[in-house]
Image (cartoon, rainbow, N blue to C red):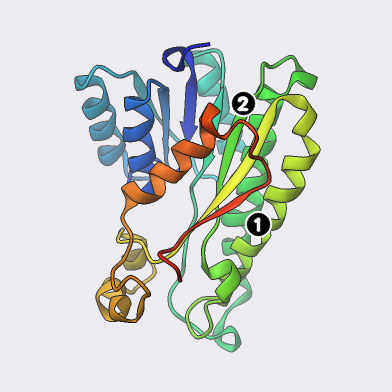
Amino acid sequence: MSEAQKVLLVTGGSRGIGAAVCRQGSKAGYRLAINYASNEAAADALVREIKSAGGDAFAVKGDVGSEADILAIFEAVDRTYGRLDAFVNNAGIVDAKARVDEMSAARLERMMRINVVGSILCAREAVKRMSTRHGGSGGSIVNLSSAAAVLGAPDNYVDYAASKGAIDTFTVGLAREVATEGIRVNAVRPGIIDTDIHASGGQPDRVALIQDSLPMKRAGTADEVAGAILYLLSDAASYTTGAILNVSGGR
């Protein structure tokens, strides 16, 4: 099957790494389903950008912290394209900088509900559509982890780091579970990437403050992470599953 016939769903696809994946995916020939939680204007603008460049895309609202929304997202892909070949489990959150002894149960519940439970439920729905066991024709899943999963993020957000550690373990387990069903499952671990996720966690100047301490003396870009994701989705990575690729500039 040519890339031009394939469908790629990206959660959290309206900004940052997700938007870069959508742009690169469209250039590779995928039809795009762009999920967003609240920023409809950004999602619609990205759809217009992709279509103006000759691609095919639509936006679908949904919060991956809600199972009902997750089901609605995947059902929208079914209605629009009737198939799913590639899935990027990108949507996630960080919270304000805090020590563990300052964290509330509500914060922890929200973090795990969105970053862990939501990601697993999204992967469940992707597997139901891709797996040869369910009548699918195979596919590829890429999960978004973080360098924080191995560094621990002390004095910043250990809860976020723990949620991404769970994603690492989930990636390996799911990859082995569906390896004979035509599905490859991999992950990327971005390091410090220059996107607005830092501002959403209350640290808009984080990149500027720490870039001199990074091995390459700079942050990464969303496009650099997206390139790794597109590789893992592609047939060039046909014998790669259960892998976690560091895109962290040596951090």
In the picture of the structure, the residue carrying the numbered disc 1 is: 168
Residue 166 position, x and y percent, is 67, 60
> Which of the pair 183/88 is nearer the observer?
183
Query: Given the image, on which type of amino acid does mark 1 rest?
Result: Asp
Q: Position of residue 73 (x, y in %)?
A: 52, 30
Residue at image coords 33%, 60%: 220
At a point 68% along the width and 46% down the height, the residue shown is 242
Q: Which residue is mark 2?
A: 139
Q: CA distance from mark 1 to mark 2?
A: 19 Å
The image quadrant that residue 69 belongs to is: top right
Give the mark nearest the N terminus, 1 or 2. 2
Q: Secondary structure at mark 1?
A: helix
Does 187 appear above or below 26? below
Q: Position of residue 221 (x, y in %)?
A: 31, 55
> Camera-side residue: 181 or 164?
181
Q: Is residue 73 visible?
A: no
- Disc 2 marks a residue whose amino acid type is Gly
Residue 6 is at least partly visible in this image:
yes
244 is higher (above) or lower (below) than 161: above
Residue at horizontal 61%, vertical 47%?
Answer: 119
